[in-house]
Image (cartoon, grey):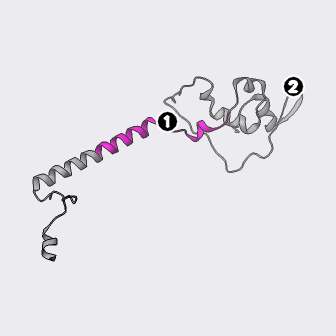
């Protein structure tokens, strides 16, 4: 009785075709490899076409009017000047043949004050009034 049951196969059970032949195995491996290569290629193309936002372009910046009106808070002013290419056309100017290094010092400037037209200013006034984000000082 058990021998009859074991010998009879139910029709709903499907059997897999063996990949024992080397040609069939190679064909199957080639198809899987081609599918993977296509999937990876498409994923790469999609990733490259999706614009990535850099931290620089994510910064909040002011408007041109705010720059000229002097209406920017210091942190926004720095971010705006760092991203000036988002407001105005810019280009890179290459250095010349003879480049001279700027000397550096380990001692920071503590209190910079100057007088202009009889009025005394400090570094913060200079930066705010002149709408700049930095100052280069060369002392000899």
Task: From this view, report whether residue 116 is shown above or below residue 23.
Answer: above
Instruction: Compare residues 68 and 20 and report the one nearer the observer.
Output: 20
Q: Position of residue 58 (x, y in %)?
A: 61, 38
Distance Cα–Cα, label 1 vs label 2: 50 Å
Neighbour class for label 1 at 10 Å: few (<14), some, many (≥20)?
few
Residue 55 placement, left or right of 63: left
Residue 134 is at least partly visible in this image: no
> Which quadrant holds the N terminus?
bottom left
Asked if the residue under mark 2 is in contact with the one under mark 1, i.e. CB atoms within 8 Å, the reply is: no
Percent coordinates x, y for residue 24 in the rendering: 13, 52
Q: Which mark is residue 51?
A: 1
59 sits to left or right of 12: right
Residue at the (70%, 30%) spot, across then down: 62
Viewer-side residue, 12 vs 133: 12
Q: Is residue 31 above or below residue 80?
A: below
Read off the residue under disc 2. Answer: 117
**Segment tinted magenta in the rendering:** 37-60
- Crowd rating for badge 2 (residues with CA inside 10 Å; few <14, some 14–19, many 20+): few
Tell which tag, 1 or 2, sits nearer the viewer: 1
Q: Position of residue 25 (x, y in %)?
A: 15, 54
- Residue at 66% over, 32% down: 81
In this view, 70 is above or below 18: above
């Amino acid at each position: 009785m058990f021998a009859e049951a074991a010998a009879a196969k139910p029709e709903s059970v499907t059997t897999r075709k063996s990949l024992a032949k080397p040609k069939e195995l190679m064909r199957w491996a080639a198809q899987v490899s081609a599918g993977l290569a296509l999937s990876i290629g498409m994923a790469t193309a999609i990733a490259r076409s999706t614009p990535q936002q850099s931290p620089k372009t994510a910064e909040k910046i002011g408007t041109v009017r705010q720059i000229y009106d002097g209406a920017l808070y210091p942190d926004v002013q720095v971010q705006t000047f760092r991203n000036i290419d988002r407001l105005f056309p810019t280009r890179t100017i290459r250095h010349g043949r003879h480049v001279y290094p700027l000397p550096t010092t380990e001692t920071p400037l503590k209190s910079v004050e100057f007088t202009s037209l009889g009025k005394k200013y400090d570094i913060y006034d200079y930066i705010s009034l002149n709408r700049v984000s930095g100052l280069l000082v060369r002392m000899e």
